[in-house]
Image (spheres, coloured by chain):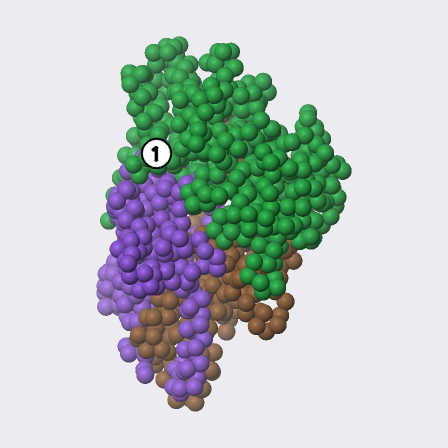
Chain colours: A brown, B purple, C green
Amino acid sequence: MSSPHATKSHLDAQATTQPATRRRSSLLREMWKQRAAYLFLMPKLILFTAFILIPIIWAFVLAFQEYGVFGSEWVGLKNFESVAKSELFRSALWNTLQYTVVTVPLQVLIALGLATLIHPLGRLGQSFFRGAFYLPTVTSMVIIAMVWRWVYNYRYGLFNYMLSIFGLPTPDWLNQSSTALWALIIMSVLIPPGVGIIMYLAAMGSIPEQLYEAAEIDGANGFQRWWRITVPLLKPTTLYLTMLSLIGSFQVFTQILLMTGGGPGHATETLVSLVYKTAFRDLEFGLASAQAIVLFVITLLFGIAQYWLLYRKAEED
Amino acid sequence: MRIKHSPTRWLTYVVLLVWAVISLLPLYWVFSTALQLPDYVESEPPKMIPMGIIEYFTHPESRSQIVTDTFSGFQQLFHSTNIWRWFFNSGYISIVVTVGILFLDTMAGYALAKKDFPGRNLIFWLIVATMMVPGQITLVPLFIMVQKFGLMNTHWALILPDLSMVFGVFLMRQYMLSIPSDLLDAAKIDGASEWKTFWTVVVPLAKPALATLGIFTFMNVWNSFLWPIIVLNDADLYTLPVGLKTLQDQNLAIFKLLMSGAAVAAVPMILVFMAFQRYFIKGLTVGGVKE
Amino acid sequence: MNYTKTLAVLATASILAVTVTGCSKDTTATQETASNWTGKITIWDGPRWEENANKYAWIESQKKAFETSHPGVTVEIVQVPWAELNDKLGVSIAGKAWPDLAPVDISGNGVNPTFVKQKVLEPVDEFITADEKKDFLPNAISAWTQDGKLYGLPLGMTVHGMLLNLDLFKERNVEPPKDGQWTWDEFVADMKKLTYDKDGDGKTDVYGLSTYVKNGYYESWPFLYMDGGRPLSDDMSKFTFDSKEATGAMKKLADLKTLPVAPKEMGSGDVGGTWKAFSAQKNVAVEPWATWAISAAQKAKMSNFMVAAYPTGSGKPVTIGGVGGWMMFHQEDAGKKKVLADLMKQLTSKDQQVVTAKNYGTFPTRQSAVDANPFGENLQMQQAQKLTQNAVMVPKHQQWKKIDEAIQSQLQLVLNGEKSPEDAMKEAKKTADELLSK
C-alpha cells in the first residue's frame, strides 16, 4: 500500500556498509525529505508523550519498587516474584485467557456478518439497523449488567425460559462456578458489537463499486465477490477491530465486577480486577504495576501474533 | 454483495430484527424505567412498559396524579439539581475534545498510513502498545502529571488527557491504508502542497472514518466519569455523569431518578449519532447501493 | 491551530505550577502558631439525607457554623460520590493531594489500617481530653484505634440485624420472636413455617430466609459467629475460621438451602436482588441487613416489619457492627491540626450525632446522644439500637481485606453446596496463614 520505492531506499540505507557518517546523513536527509510527515504527527505526539507515554513509563518504574506514600523502596524483581507465585493471579489469568480466546474471534466475525447483512439494505434500513446496533452502546455498563442479570435469573429470566421451552436444563447461571464464566462469555458474544458494525459499514461504503462490477463480468457469484473483494479490502478494519477487541477482552473488568463480583469463589476473577484491587484497595501500586506489566506483555504477544496472521500474510498474497 | 431475491431478504430482516431487539433492550429499559410509576419500578420480573400508560385508561379518576408520577424523575432532576450546569460542562468539553481529536488523529493517522519516514513503524507500534496497558495503573502517574502542570480542578485536566487518547490515530491509520495511493499521487503531480493535498483530497475521502471517530470520541468523553471525579473538586465544574453520581445515596439507589438521569444523558449522544450518520452513506463511490 | 493553543496553555500552566508550589513551601514553614491558625480547610463528603432537595445541606450548615466560630478559616466542601470515594482517595494520597478531612462511610469498619500503615492519617489523641473520650462508646473508640492511637472521631454506628416481614409471619400464623430474641432451633422451626407455595402452582415461591455473600459485607457472618467461631484469634496471629464452632455454623447455614427454607440464590453476591426479594417482591420473610436498610424499608412503605437479633447458638449473642466518622489526613502545621480537630469535634458532637441518627439511620457513638433518645417514635430503630450492645467489629488486621476476600469467596462455594465447610476453610486458611505471617 505504501510507496514501494521509499521503503526500499530506507531499507537500503540501513543495510549498506558505508561509513557511519554517511549513513547518518542519509538518514537525516530522508527525515528532512519527509519533514511533512513529522509535522503532521507532532501535535499528537506531544500530547501523547505528556499524558500517556510518561505516565506509563512512570507506572512501569513503580513495578520495581515497594510503594510508600512518603518514599518508595527499590525492591528489584520482588513484585514480579509475588506475581509468579500467586495462585489467584494464575487463576485470573486462566479465566481471562478463556474469555479472550472465545470472545475475540466471535465478536469480530459477528460484526462482519451483521455488517454484511446490513450493507446491501436501502438507505432507511441501513440507518435503522446501524442505529439499533450502535445506540445501545450509549447505555452504561451498570444498566446493561442489570438487564443481563435479569436475563440470567434462574427463576424468571429470559434465558432459562427459552431453554425450558426446549426441555433443556436450567441452571443458576451466574451463581455456580461451573457456569458463571460461560454465562459472561455468552453475554459478551450476544451483545452486538456496535462499534465493529459501524466500522465495517464505514469501510464497506468505501470499496469502489467498479471492483464488484468487474468481478460480476468475470462471472463471480455473490459469495465469491464477498470473499475475494470485500473481505480482503476490509483487512485493515479487521485488524483494528481484532486488536481493539483483544485489548478490551484482556482488560475485561466492569461488567464482571457488576455481574458476579469475581465469584462464585474466584470463578470469574479477571486480571484487571486484580490490578484494580491491588492498587486501590491495598495501595500496593508497585505490585499492581507488576501485574499490569505481565498482562501487557501477554496482550502484546497476542497482538503481534494476530497482526502477523492478518496483515503480513495479507501483504504476501 | 447485494441481496436481490425476497426469501433471503426476509431471512436477513428476521435475523437482524431479532438481534436488534436484544441489542436495544437495555436502552429501552432506561427510558421505560425513567417513565415507570414509582410503585412498579422495582417489580420482578420487570414491567416492560411504563404502567402509567395503562393506568391512565384504567384509572381515569387519578389521571393528573399518574402523569405527575410518570414524569417525577425528570421533574426532580430539572428542578432540584444543577443539571443544566453539568450538561453545559459535559457538552462543551465533549465538543472541544471531539473537534480536536478529529484534527489531530486524522493528521497523525494520515502520516502513519501514507507517508514513509524513518521511525514510522516504531511510532505505530508504540501507539498500539500503549493501548494495551490497563488504565488502572496509569491513573496515579497521570494525576501527578496533571498536578505538575497545575491543571487540577480545571477542565483542562479532562480535555488534555482526552486529546491524547490514541485509539483514533490507530483507527484513522487503518482506514487510510485502504485509500488508494494513486489518488494522492495524482494530487501531488498537480503540484498541490502537502497541506492542500491533506485538506482537499485526504479529508474528504476519509469522511466515513471521521464520522465514526467523531461519534466514538464524543461518546467516550461524554460518558467518562471516574477520571473527572478524581481531578475535579468544585461542584460547578462537574460533568453530567459525575453530577448524577453525586445524587446517589450510599446504599440504596433511587432507581427512577437514576434512570431519568441516564435517559437525559443518552439524548445528546443519540443526537450526535444522528448528525454524523449521514456521512456514512456517501463513501468513496458514487451510488453504492442499488435496490 | 488547536495544538499551539494547547501548548501555550501547557507552558503557562507548568510555569504557574512551579510558582504555586514554590509559594506553598514558604507558607508551610510558619509553624507553631497554635490555635489562631487561619486559612482554608478542605473537607470531602458524600450525599447524606435530603433537606430542601439538597443532599449536602448538613455539611454546608456545619461549614457555616464553623466559619462563624473560627473567623479567618474557610471550609471548602468537595462533593464525592460514596462509590468512588475510595478511588479518589487512593489516587489523591498517591499524589499527596489529600483532603484535610474525609468521611469514613457508615458501612466502614472504622479506621483503614492501610492508611495508618502509610502514615497518611493523623492521630487525634492530643486534642481529646479524657472526659471527652469517656462520652464515646468503648466499641466505637476501639474500632478507630490502632496501635494504641486514636485515628479520627466516630460519628455513627451501624449494626447488622434481622429484618422480619410481619405480614408474612401473620399470614403463616407464626409468632415473631419475643423481644427479638430466638435460638437457632426456634429460628429454623419458624423458617420452615414461612416457606410455602403462595400461588398454589406446586412450587415453593416464598422462603423463610435469604442473604448474600460478598467481599467487605458481613450480613451472613453473625450466623457463623453463633457457636463462638471467629475468623482470627484475639491476638490476630492465627486463622480460626476452620474451628469446629465456625464450620459447624457454616454447615447449619448451608443446610437451610437443602431443607429447603432458603432460595437457591442465597449466598450469591447479588446485593440488589436480595434486597428486592425482601422489600419489593416480598418473597423472602426474613433477611439480615445492616441497619441502613431500616430507613430504606420504611421509605419503601414497608410499615409492618420488625428488627430482631440473629438466632443464638452455643456462643454469646453477637452481631457485627461498623463505625463511620471523620479522619484527619497528614498535616505539616500544628496550628491547623488543632483547628481541624475542632471541626471534627463539631461534626461528631452530641447534637450532630442526634441529627444524623434521626435522618440517616445510624446509631450514635456518644452516650450523651444515646441518652437523648433520638429514635423516640421509631420502633424499628429502637429495636435495632438494642443490638449495638452485642456488636463486635471485624478484625483490624492490616491484611484484613485480603483475608476477608479469601474467606468470602470460599463461603460462596459453601453456600452453593459446591464445597464442604471444612475443605473451604482449609483453602482459606492457606491464603490467610501466608498473609498473617507477613
Residue at image x 47%, y 63%? A191
**Residue ID for mark 1:** C56
Asked where in the image residue C71 lies, by quadrant, the reply is: top left
In the depicted view, which residue is nearer to us: C32 or B69? B69
In the image, residue C345 sits, relative to residue C319, either above or below, namely above
Could you say where residue B118 lies in the image, as x and y percent from the top left? 41, 54
User: Is B203 displayed left or right of A262 in the figure?
Assistant: left
Q: Chain of mark 1?
A: C
Asked where in the image residue C214 lies, by quadrant, the reply is: top right
In the image, residue B135 sits, relative to residue A175, either above or below, namely above
Is residue A300 visible from the viewing direction of this image? no
Is residue C236 visible from the viewing direction of this image? yes
Residue at image x 42%, y 68%? B21
Q: Amino acid at mark 1?
A: Tyr
User: Is A266 displayed left or right of B168 in the figure?
Assistant: right
Figure label count: 1
In the depicted view, which residue is nearer to us: B121 or C124? C124
Pick the quarter of the image with the C terminus of chain C: top right
User: Is C99 displayed left or right of C265 in the figure?
Assistant: left
Could you say where residue A288 lies in the image, as x and y percent from the top left? 55, 40
In the image, residue B213 sits, relative to residue B81, either above or below, namely below
Residue at image x 42%, y 31%? C358
Could you say where residue B12 lies in the image, as x and y percent from the top left? 43, 79
State the SS at label 1.
loop
In the depicted view, which residue is nearer to us: C187 or A99? C187
Classify mark 1: residues with Cα within 10 Å, few (<14), some (14-19) or many (20+): many
Residue at image x 59%, y 41%? C176
